[in-house]
Image (cartoon, rainbow, N blue to C red):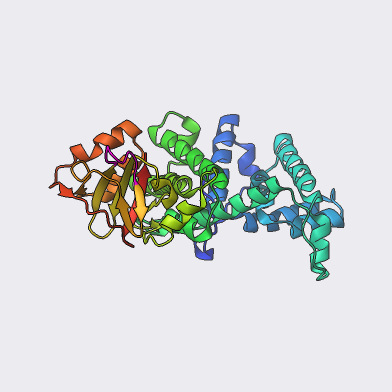
């Protein structure tokens, strides 16, 4: 996938092709120039920019009705296939369109009209200030929302061309927007695809990609790799926190809710990208792992052999073995916590043993700086 997003006017450069120079190209030269041209367009122009040129092409072709042209102008910019924008931009630049390119343009517009047909009535009613709910399917709504989230990061990616480094802060964005877990895969997919394309271009295994990205230097690959990898890492981290806070669909006795009603704990922490489990699950557990975001201490409560399970009284953990329940300070929690949360149950039991710091006894008290990290 090529680079997309909005660009500033001073950054845009216009390509121009004459019939004379095109007539002198060999088939191979035309193919390479075509790749360079499309890569340039995708890099420099947004969906909104390209829609204007598509509308101009539709008007001058004489093959489309006024209603069809109006439908394209009214629909969301992202609904128009990228291929249509690229072909129209090539036409505007003087490129002689062959039968294949014209077919791509027409097929793309057919696809657009099919997708737009379900929303045409609602858009017209909205123009007449009539309140109505668009008759979109749940899948359509999800896709539109996913495109909105992807577009947010693509616009930020476009800014990276003038910077040496840019932190997308995707985790904070997902939390602020309360992005549901069922959208995360769709958001990640385009970035996984473009990362694979960049890696192939850098390796030089594909001549077309190597030519298309010939203007990139090592520093360009580095900063774009870091940007996309940061987004994907935050998607993974955010997905884990969403799973952790999801309430299990089991019946809970009313008295358990009362037992944890006064418990003060940290629901989540943006710095370390972690979240607490439901405190109700502590009652009846045999092990509880906690992390204090202020002191950076990771602790492990183990149920006493006589009690058998852990319990909660006010803001205190009860029923734990004072000898086996300990805590240690994490020197690099930003690196160690993902390792802990991603490990198996058996590995979690051995995790504290591998930490080289002083072992301290736990006192059972839970406060607003404490993350209820995991129960077993």
Most extreme residue toward the front is 306
Vertical side of 354 occupied by 46: above or below = below
Q: Along the line of sight, which residue is nearer the eye, 111 or 344?
A: 344
Is residue 158 shown to the viewer in this render?
no
Most extreme residue toward the top is 205
**Relative to 327, is 283 on the left or the right?**
right
**Relative to 223, is 331 on the left or the right?**
left
Is 309 magenta? The answer is yes
Most extreme residue toward the bottom is 129
Chain part drawn in magenta: 303-310
Q: Quadrant of the C terminus?
A: top left
Q: For the point 53% across and 57% down, which residue is it?
A: 178
Q: Along the line of sight, which residue is nearer the eye, 149 or 329?
A: 329
**Which percent across, then down, holds residue 185?**
53, 42
Q: How many marks?
A: 0
Vertical side of 243 occupied by 258: above or below = below
The image quarter in which residue 229 lies: top left
Is 177 magenta? The answer is no
Q: For the point 70% across and 48% down, which residue is it?
A: 138
Is residue 140 shown to the viewer in this render?
yes
**Relative to 174, is 313 on the left or the right?**
left
Q: Along the line of sight, which residue is nearer the eye, 40 or 360?
A: 360
Q: Along the line of sight, which residue is nearer the eye, 77 or 185?
A: 185
**Which percent across, then down, holds residue 329?**
19, 50
Q: For the point 73% across and 56% down, which residue is it?
A: 75
**Which percent across, then down, holds residue 109?**
76, 45
**Relative to 176, is 38 on the left or the right?**
right
**Which percent across, then down, holds residue 256?**
46, 51
| Main SS class of the magenta portion in the image | loop
């Amino acid at each position: 996938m090529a680079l997309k997003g909005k660009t500033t006017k001073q950054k845009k450069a216009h390509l121009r092709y004459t019939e004379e120079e095109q007539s002198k190209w060999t088939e191979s030269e035309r193919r390479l120039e075509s790749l360079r041209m499309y890569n340039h367009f995708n890099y420099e122009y947004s969906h909104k920019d390209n829609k204007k040129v598509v509308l101009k092409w539709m008007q001058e072709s004489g093959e489309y009705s006024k209603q069809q042209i109006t439908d394209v102008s009214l629909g969301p910019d992202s609904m128009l296939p990228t291929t249509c924008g690229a072909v129209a931009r090539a036409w505007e630049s003087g490129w002689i369109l062959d039968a294949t390119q014209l077919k791509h343009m027409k097929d793309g517009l057919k696809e657009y009209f099919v997708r737009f047909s379900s929303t045409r009535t609602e858009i017209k009613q909205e123009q007449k200030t009539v309140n109505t709910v668009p008759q979109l399917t749940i899948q359509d709504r999800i896709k539109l929302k996913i495109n909105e989230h992807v577009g947010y990061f693509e616009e930020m990616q476009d800014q990276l061309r003038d910077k040496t480094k840019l932190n997308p802060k995707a985790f904070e964005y997902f939390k602020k927007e309360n992005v549901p877990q069922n959208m995360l895969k769709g958001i990640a997919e385009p970035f996984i695809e473009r990362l694979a394309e960049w890696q192939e271009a850098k390796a030089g295994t594909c001549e077309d990609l190597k030519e298309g990205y010939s203007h990139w230097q090592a520093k360009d690959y580095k900063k774009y790799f870091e940007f996309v990898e940061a987004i994907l890492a935050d998607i993974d981290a955010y997905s884990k926190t969403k799973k952790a806070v999801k309430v299990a669909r089991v019946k809970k006795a009313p008295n358990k809710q009362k037992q944890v009603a006064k418990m003060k704990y940290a629901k989540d922490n943006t710095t370390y990208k972690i979240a607490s489990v439901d405190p109700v699950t502590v009652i009846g557990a045999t092990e509880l792992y906690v992390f204090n975001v202020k002191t950076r201490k990771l602790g492990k409560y183990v149920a006493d052999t006589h009690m058998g399970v852990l319990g909660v009284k006010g803001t205190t953990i009860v029923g734990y073995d004072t000898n086996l329940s300990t805590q240690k300070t994490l020197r690099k929690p930003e690196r160690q916590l993902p390792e802990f949360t991603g490990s198996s149950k058996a590995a979690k039991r051995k995790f504290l043993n591998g930490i080289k710091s002083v072992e301290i006894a736990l006192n059972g008290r839970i406060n607003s700086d404490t993350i209820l990290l995991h129960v077993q």
